[in-house]
Image: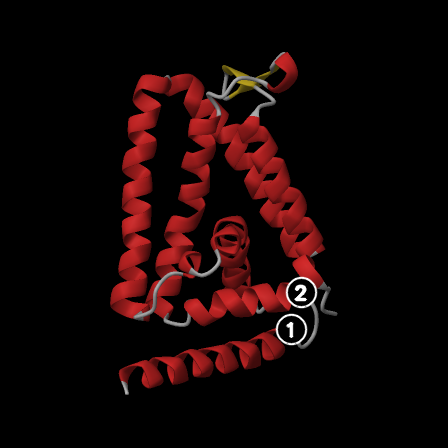
Amino acid sequence: MAKPGLLDLEKHFAFYGAYHSNPVNVAIHMVFVWPILFTALLLLCYAPPLFGLPPIELSLFGHGLALFLNVGCLLALVYAAFYVFLDPRAGSLAALLCLMCWVAASFVAGRLGFSLAWKVVLGAQIVCWTGQFIGHGVFEKRAPALLDNLVQAFLMAPFFVLLEALQTFFGYEPYPGFCATVEAKIDAQVSEWKDKQEKLIT
């Protein structure tokens, strides 16, 4: 059953789907979206801890790991919580991946050091964003969603590519009829966009 407002998954996924209907572009996003989140968290791992809280000391693969409750941790928690509210089942998987990204980013940050990490992050971000813009420009032939809805593009993209993968490979849908309803909304939005493009040309 569809939820209202900010938690309306049908509305959000239809918006996303209208910008990602080409299978090559979809595949490109599946490859590059999560690395963008991971490398962003990697850089944020160097932010100071919130309220001066001490780190959580763990051991990972025989190495010491210090998890700082900072902006990176807060971002991962916000993403995780929002995805669970959108859809408890797929959202829980997405939330787990977000937290795993934060832990893994903290581990990598501790091994690299800031002077090397920011270069790795910059290179990865350039590659990932270039790939996505190529996907839109060459295959989708439509500008990215972030140009129309910046918050939705950044906040929801990781969950959407995961949901797309779950639907494609496992036939998952949050509730019966979700895929059919969303597909109809996507078709309507794409048709509306094409009509606008034709009017601009003529």
Indicate whether 35 appears above or below 86.
above
Task: State the quadrant of the C terminus.
Answer: bottom left
The answer to whether one can see residue 121 in this image is yes
* Other-residue count near label 1 (Cα within 10 Å), few / some / many at <14 / 14–19 / ≥20: some
Q: Position of residue 104 (x, y in %)?
A: 49, 30
Q: Percent from the top left, x then y, of residue 150?
A: 47, 53
Image vertical order of residue 158 relative to residue 74, above or below: below
The answer to whether 50 appears left or right of 196 in the picture is right
Pick the quarter of the image with the N terminus.
Answer: bottom right
Residue type marked 1: Phe
**Residue name at image x 73 percent, y 64 percent:** 3
Residue 172 in view, yes or no = no
Residue corresponding to mark 2: 174
Mark 1 residue element: helix
Residue 178 got which mark? Answer: 1
Residue occupying image coordinates x 32% and y 63%: 136
On the rendered structure, is 79 left or right of 39? right
The one nearer the camera, 179 or 136, is 136
Whether residues under marks 1 and 2 lie with C-beta atoms below 8 angstroms apart, the answer is: yes
Label 2: state its secondary structure. Answer: loop
Q: Position of residue 116 (x, y in %)?
A: 30, 21
Q: Position of residue 45 (x, y in %)?
A: 48, 24
Distance in Å between CA atoms under marks 1 and 2: 7 Å
Q: Is residue 93 above or below residue 101?
A: below
Q: Residue at x 27, y 83 (%)?
A: 201
Q: Nearer the viewer, residue 187 or 103?
A: 187
Q: Residues within 10 Å of mark 2 (few under 14, many from 20)?
A: some
Of 7 and 110, nearer the camera is: 7
